């Protein structure tokens, strides 16, 4: 599925749903069992831990329990993407440690498991880029609750300045601006891509560092199409 188009849609959906962007609280407690977007670490196997979840390990059921809602689970089928089938859970408004945000949780599911779920889908619609959006059968939604997280997309409902981002996340080893004028702060050792548009709206993607190419591939494709673009 085309992450550039989906992230643009998510920006619009979250802004439209709230009507305004919240101000980041002045004081945030970083101690204890905080589920904060900058509180990241790697486990002994090199897997990213963030929001109290471990990518590649934590199942969707645990995410739903922490968020206190089932989210909207959808299967996407893209003709020109690898992998062609993906399944995501969308959580529109989640409050963690006084920070309100939307989340997209992409699940780690084999293609041969998703293909029959596509065939059993209750309804199929098309997005503007041709990607098919499939409403899953209830039995398949239940089965997917045990699938682990593969990719987290985090959309904070606050406009964030570069100075604040640098103070919380640190100076990125590399950064690049895409064709939509979104500047991506790239932290490959953390498996994190922090995108910020000129207004201060932010999208953060988290994957295991070993899978960072999953984040870079659509960004490289975007830059290759842009005049004077380069690869990060």
Image (cartoon, rainbow, N blue to C red):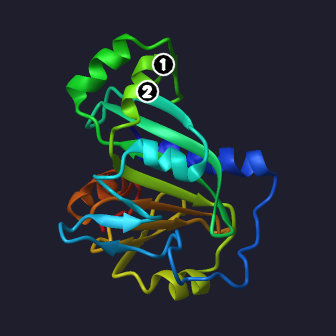
Which of the pair 90/98 is nearer the observer?
Answer: 98
Q: Is mark 2 on a helix, strand or loop?
A: helix
**Image side of residue 46 versus residue 197, left or right:** left
For mark 2, does the 10 Å Cα neighbourhood hold few (<14), some (14 to 19), or many (20 or more) residues?
A: few
What residue is at 73 percent from the left and 78 percent from the top?
Answer: 25
- The spot of residue 3 in percent (x, y) is 43, 46
What residue is at 26 percent from the left and 37 percent from the top?
Answer: 82
- The spot of residue 196 in percent (x, y) is 56, 67
Q: Is residue 87 visible?
A: yes
Give how far apart the Cα atoms at labels 1 and 2 are: 6 Å
Give the residue at mark 1: 138
Q: Which mark is residue 126?
A: none
- The spot of residue 161 in percent (x, y) is 64, 79
What residue is at 59 percent from the left and 45 percent from the top?
Answer: 91
Q: In which quarter of the image is the N terminus?
A: top left
Which of the pair 37/217 is nearer the observer?
Answer: 37
- The spot of residue 146 in percent (x, y) is 35, 37
Outermost residue on the left side: it is 45
Q: Is residue 4 visible?
A: no
**Image side of residue 2 versus residue 200, left or right:** left
Q: Is mark 1 on a helix, strand or loop?
A: helix
Q: Is residue 181 above or below residue 167?
A: above
**Image side of residue 225 versus residue 5, left or right:** left
Q: Residue 142 carries which label?
A: 2
Q: Are marks 1 and 2 in contact (CB under 8 Å)?
A: yes
For the image shown, how many numbered marks are present on the structure?
2
Q: In which quarter of the image is the C terminus?
A: bottom left
């Amino acid at each position: 599925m085309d992450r550039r188009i989906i992230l643009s849609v998510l920006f619009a959906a979250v802004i439209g749903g709230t009507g305004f962007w919240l101000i980041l609280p002045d004081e945030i407690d970083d101690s204890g069992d905080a589920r904060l977007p900058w509180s990241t670490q790697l486990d002994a196997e090199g897997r990213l831990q963030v929001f109290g979840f471990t990518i590649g390990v934590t199942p969707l059921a645990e995410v739903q329990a922490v968020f206190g809602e089932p989210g909207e689970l959808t299967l996407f089928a893209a003709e020109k993407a690898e992998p062609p089938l993906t399944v995501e859970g969308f959580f529109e408004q989640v409050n963690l440690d006084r920070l309100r945000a939307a989340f997209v949780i992409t699940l780690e599911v084999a293609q041969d498991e998703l293909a029959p779920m596509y065939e059993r889908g209750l309804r199929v619609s098309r997005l503007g880029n041709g990607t098919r959006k499939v409403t899953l059968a209830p039995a398949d939604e239940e089965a997917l609750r045990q699938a682990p997280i593969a990719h987290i997309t985090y959309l904070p409902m606050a406009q964030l300045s570069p100075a604040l981002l640098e103070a919380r996340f640190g100076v990125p080893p590399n950064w690049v601006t895409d064709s939509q004028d979104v500047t991506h702060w790239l932290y490959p050792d953390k498996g994190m891509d922090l995108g910020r548009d000129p207004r201060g709206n932010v999208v953060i993607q988290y994957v295991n560092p070993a899978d960072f190419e999953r984040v870079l591939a659509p960004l490289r494709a975007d830059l290759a199409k842009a005049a004077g673009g380069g690869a990060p």
